[in-house]
Amino acid sequence: MGLLSDPNRRKALTSLLTRLNTPICVVCYLAGIAWFMGLAFEPFTLRTYMSENAMGSTMVEERFSSGERALSTAREFAAQKKKVGGMPVDWLVKTMQARGLEVFTQSFSRNLPFPDESKERFMVRGTNVYGILRAPRAPRTEALVLSAPCSPGNSNNQAVGLLLGLAQYFRSQIYWAKDIIFLVNDHDLIGMQAWLEGYHHTNITGMEYTPLQGRAGSIQAALSLELSSDVITSLDLVLEGLNGQLPNLDLVNLFHAFCQKLGILCTIQGKLQRSDWDTVEGYTHAAQTMMLMVLKQASGRPWGEHGLFLRYHIEAASIHGINSFRQYKTDTTTIGRLLEGMVRKLNNLLERLHQSYFFYLMPSLTRFVSIGYYMPAFGLLTAILLLRALDLWVQLGSPTAVMEDGVGDAEVQSSPGVLSLLTPVVISHLTGVALYTLPVLSQELAVQHFPVSETEAVVLTAIAIYTAGLALPHNTQRLISGEGTEQGWKVLKLVALLYLAVLLGCTALINFSLGFILAVTLVPAAACVTPHVPKALSAVAMVLLSPGCTVLYCIFLFQELQEAPVTLSEGWMLFLSVISQGVLDHALYGSLVYPLLSLLVYPCWLLFWNILFWK
């Protein structure tokens, strides 16, 4: 405090920061990247541990032994599904009632804003079926959910069979202190969204559904099961939910503890943990696992049905069975015992999971990076924006008088007008509003005049508006009376730097991965752009560091980390698919990535693009 309160020391510190501004910014950027990449090194991470006392011990005797009966039920379910050509509602109702559950159905429908070509659907109608096992030893104020989607074809039949087998087994037990809901939902995420909105009496996505006739208590936790094979080699835990939300870390620890107890191979991001962390291969494996989690979280979309529960403060995860070429096999009975043990431990909870972390990254199932470890990497990147803003502030506040022949008369530089600063800000954000609204609104007009489908019209319109924003500087200058001053672009850049710093900071608090990825590409462009650099080279660099190109880079990186690299043409097709899926995720589930990029990030980038062509 003494350093800042003393005018002489404050002036010396300011002079030092401005004189060494560029070297300090370069060091901060390199340090931020190095810090983040170092998080995958095991000595820099924390070992996972159980924080909730009610789940601290795995001394539960699992007795489920009806794996073969569950597979028989799964085959019967598959036959009924094939017979009716979809969800066998009547058969599910009878089967659940035969197992002693209170059974209810819910019908729903949803008109998509444009056809989902990946799943070939536009108007979605379906029915959810759920049965409630009432708690015999409690006032029925709390509940747990076990769900399995009714997927098309032969997918996920085994999960539904195991769900019904567990329902029959759980019905014979008397130690339940919470209601247990067994849910089979139609049309994957859309059906789950309809059920959750009906259960909580909300309608935030425009879904049409019938009210739920039966309810249990407040849902404490949920598990979603995906099995498509009679025998699996490993279980993959899926954590990433809507808008980058994650479940409480204790739910991850519980899953890993029971996998270790029952001898089940468990993975995260589809990758097994390696023990040779001190080798280059071991570090690379951990870094790939962590980067896959970052990319999935940054996408903002739910990567499993559990992702929609997290919006309602319900801790949830999806368990995905994988049948690969590994010789290690696990039967359905063992998977049933895993779920039995997890549900029994969750049944012991006296309050919601809250003692462990909600913000973390995981290079493996036994190591995690807490928010206090990864936030400094983001802070180093955003510090560059503040240092650049400080440099501009000092320049704008310093005397600009030009002495002539030693005489004290000064030629004072003209201050920038309000119009010259307000115009690019308003036009940039109007362009963002057009990017957000016009693709969906103008799809019918585009289909009438061009030989494209509705989905192609939405994607191509978005790309056209995004590209048209590059002409913004010329249109802006026509609206400004006279030429821009030297101080004008400095003031505009000062405002844009502070705007970007606040925007990235708020984004990182909600979704760290998205904020960090945007900072990696946008901060260098924002720090270096001026009207006095070579226009052609700088324009190419700005475009390569734009939000759209950032999404394209992430697609190629994700495919590379998934060990499924793609060509340039395949990557471009995936890029178009990601745009359409982002618009659909926002309309169907409330994903915030598309409106964030179109309404805030893209207009902010346009401000720096305007500075580059400042006259």
Image (cartoon, rainbow, N blue to C red):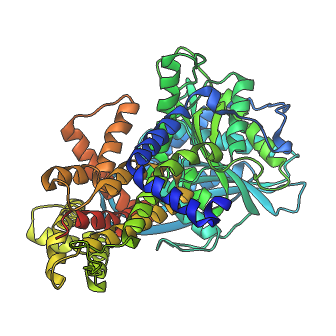
Task: Point out the residue furthest to the top here.
Answer: 327
Q: Nearer the viewer, residue 45 or 360?
A: 45
Q: Is residue 159 left or right of residue 32?
A: right
Task: Point out the residue furthest to the front here.
Answer: 406
Rendered image quadrant of residue 360: top right
Total count of labels: 0
Q: Is residue 553 above or below residue 567?
A: below
Q: Nearer the viewer, residue 553 or 471?
A: 471
Whether residue 270 can be seen here = no
Q: Quadrant of the N terminus?
A: bottom right
| Residue at 32% in and 64% down | 602
Q: Is residue 243 above or below residue 288?
A: below
| Residue at 31% in and 81% down | 422
Horizontal and vertical percent position of residue 73: 60, 38
Horizontal and vertical percent position of residue 397: 40, 72
Q: Is residue 340 above or below residue 92?
A: above
Rendered image quadrant of residue 417: bottom left
Q: Quadrant of the C terminus?
A: bottom left
Whether residue 598 can be seen here = yes
Q: Nearer the viewer, residue 416 or 59?
A: 416
Horizontal and vertical percent position of residue 136: 87, 54
Task: Point out the residue furthest to the right here.
Answer: 137
Q: Is residue 256 left or right of residue 57?
A: left
| Residue at 55% in and 24% down | 272
| Residue at 64% in and 49% down | 247
Horizontal and vertical percent position of residue 164: 65, 44
Q: Is residue 75 left or right of residue 547?
A: right
Q: Is residue 372 above or below residue 271?
A: below
Q: Nearer the viewer, residue 193 or 359?
A: 359
